[in-house]
Image (spheres, grey):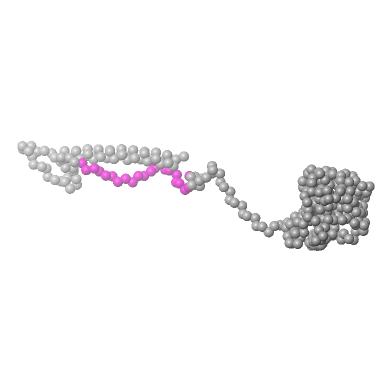
Amino acid sequence: MTLQGANVFNEGDNSTIYTMNSLQTGQYCVVIPKNLDNNINMIVDLNMKSSFDSLMNNTVDKDSLIKDVNDEYNGVLTKYPSGVLVFPMFDINDLTSTINSNDKQKMFDETKRIGGITSEIYQKLTAEGIDKSKIDQKIIILEKTDIDNKFVTWLKEQMPNFVDGVNYSELKGSTASQDVNPFTGEPAADVAPAADIFGAPVTSETSTEPVTTEPEVTPDVTEPEAAPAIPDSDSTNVESTNVEEQAIPEPKPVTDTKLETTQVIPEVKDSTEAVTPENQNVEPAPVANGEEVEVNEIDKKSGGFANLLILLVILVVVTIASIELGKFLYNTFGA
């Protein structure tokens, strides 16, 4: 079979070594047996990146690296006859620091990377016609170092049904070597690998049925409350200018409006004294040249005409004022 999107690094009689550069999961190497009739297990080795880096730096040749990979894979086959051996390109120094500091968030992140790679391989295998029921849902991690042991112990606590470990020394025929710092006993420092082994990054679809369930990570961070929405400029100051929402009485017709006015009668200056209740019974003035003048009749006519003129003026003023007030009220409060 062929692994879609992967590069054939080496093809042997019983297995094929592929290298993959995935945009989703990064670089990794995988060894797949040609006989997949048995139950398929996925075994993960987190410590082989330095060996691939050595090839890129011309420290070792390709044949030596292939021999190391095949030797390790032959040991895996003694316990897992249809095992798929996966080498994620993990920086072992970063992983060591993460596990020693017990950084749970970073350990979850590394676990997600492993789950992403195994899920991608699972999808590629099923796309080639492998029955899903033949692929074991548990990931098995090779325990080569104390860091591996600690990581597997932590993973078992988090996902006991999906992760297991196997002691590397228990696998028969395992003679794979690894670059180790003779002073610290830890793997040698990683060197950035070149891209020609793994090829250019390719896009791979992620399977909806991963080999392992990735843990839910809930960071202890309180989400900030959403900021209140900012109103549009068209709706600004609507509350202050909306006349319909204010309790404004309906304007009354001008004819129904009663105006309380104080009638002011201007003082009329006349040579003849106005008739008042006090002087209505005053005796007539003396006659001149023996002729009697009817003063009361003249005074009454003059006073009556003046009062009529005053009332007429007041009526005109009140009428004009009522009309203007009606116009004002209609223009201000009218529809």
Horizontally, residue 145 falls left or right of residue 312, namely: right
Q: Judge left or right: residue 188 versus residue 37.
A: left
Query: In x, y percent, where is residue 71?
Result: 90, 54
Residue at 16% of width from left, 46% of height from top? 279
Residue 223 shown left or right of residue 122 in the figure: left
Q: Quadrant of the N terminus?
A: top right
x and y percent of residue 53 in the render?
Answer: 81, 50
Residue 156 seen in render: no
- Magenta-span inclusion, residue 308: no
The structure residue drawn at horizontal position 50% and vertical position 46%, both measured from the top left corner, is 237
First to last magenta residue range: 243-268
Viewer-nearest residue: 289 or 178: 178
Q: Is residue 328 above or below residue 139?
A: above
In the displayed structure, does residue 28 sit left or right of residue 307? right
Q: Residue at x 33, y 46 (%)?
A: 260
Quick one: 235 or 290, which is closer to the camera?
A: 235
How many numbered marks have been drawn onto this rendered protein structure? Answer: 0
Q: Residue at x 83, y 56 (%)?
A: 179
Residue 296 in the image: state x and y as whole percent.
15, 41
Please say whether residue 245 is one of the residues in the magenta stretch: yes
Residue 21 versus residue 118: which sits nearer the camera?
21
Q: Determine the residue located farthest toward the right in the rendered image.
A: 13
Residue 144, x across and y down, in percent: 84, 59
Tell which of 9 and 319 is nearer to you. Answer: 9
Q: Main secondary structure of the magenta part?
A: loop
Q: Is residue 309 visible?
A: yes
